[in-house]
Amino acid sequence: MPLRKPLFLSILAPLLLTTPTVATADSGAVPPLTAAGTDLTGWRDLPWDTPVEAAANAFGDALRRDHIEVAGCYFSTAVPVTLASEAWEAWLCEDRTSGRVIAVSLEKGYDDMFFDERRTTELYNTFLAEFTERYGPAHEFWEHCHNARWHETIQHRWFFPSTTVSLLLRDGPDRWVSIRFEKPNDTPNFGPGVCVTRPRDLRG
């Protein structure tokens, strides 16, 4: 039986940009590439495999928690960041064995147990425009996906030698967004939820 495009995708499609407008301001979410313009070696001058204690010391306002895994990020240290005047956190995701930082996940509205109503943001299209302006069209674009609530999910990914970048719309109606920078790994990616089509390379 052929797969049909879920109704919610048709309803939300006009609301979500796959071809972004030009960014008019710097939200602070998108770090620059190296001088050669070919790589991203970490997040805000934090190289991958830095011991988490050293990373926490490098950010004087880092918040410490008991270790927990949320959305695939095992962490105990979060750095408060401001993105376009909104309060976010940068989670320093650790390797469970070595305790070294292997990813940074930018998250909003987490209260140490759940994501609350503060997770909503209107910055998704701003982020997408800035990422596209700085890194070019996404190397991998997942659409026609949904989460457990049957709400639309979308993911754009960029691949560089030292870093994989992901812009994730976790929930379309809720405007719930996550951004992740991570050391490349061989973990399979099956998309941001249940997807009815394969990803596309937007570079043409």
Image: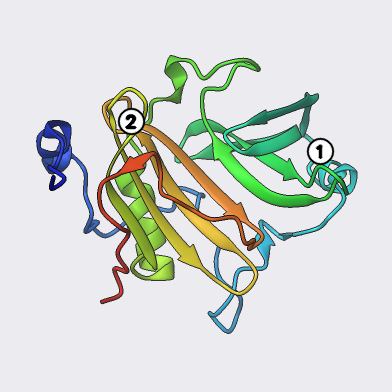
Residue 142 in picture, x, y percent from top left: 33, 53
Would you say residue 30 is visible in this rendering? no
Closer to us: 152 or 195: 195
Location of the C terminus (image quadrant): bottom left
What kind of element bears circle 2? loop
Q: Is residue 173 left or right of residue 73?
A: left
User: Height in image: 129 above or below 96?
Assistant: below
User: Height in image: 150 above or below 133?
Assistant: above
Amino acid identity at mark 1: Gly
Residue 175, label in figure = 2
Question: Does label 2 or label 1 sit earlier along the sequence?
Answer: 1
Location of the N terminus (image quadrant): top left
What residue appears at the point 33 percent right and 48 percent down from the top-left corner?
126
Would you say residue 27 is visible in this rendering? yes
What kind of element bears circle 1? loop
Nearer mark to the viewer, of 2 and 1: 2
Residue that carries the numbered disc 1 in the rendered image: 60
Q: Is residue 56 left or right of residue 125?
A: right
Closer to us: 55 or 105: 105
Amino acid identity at mark 2: Arg
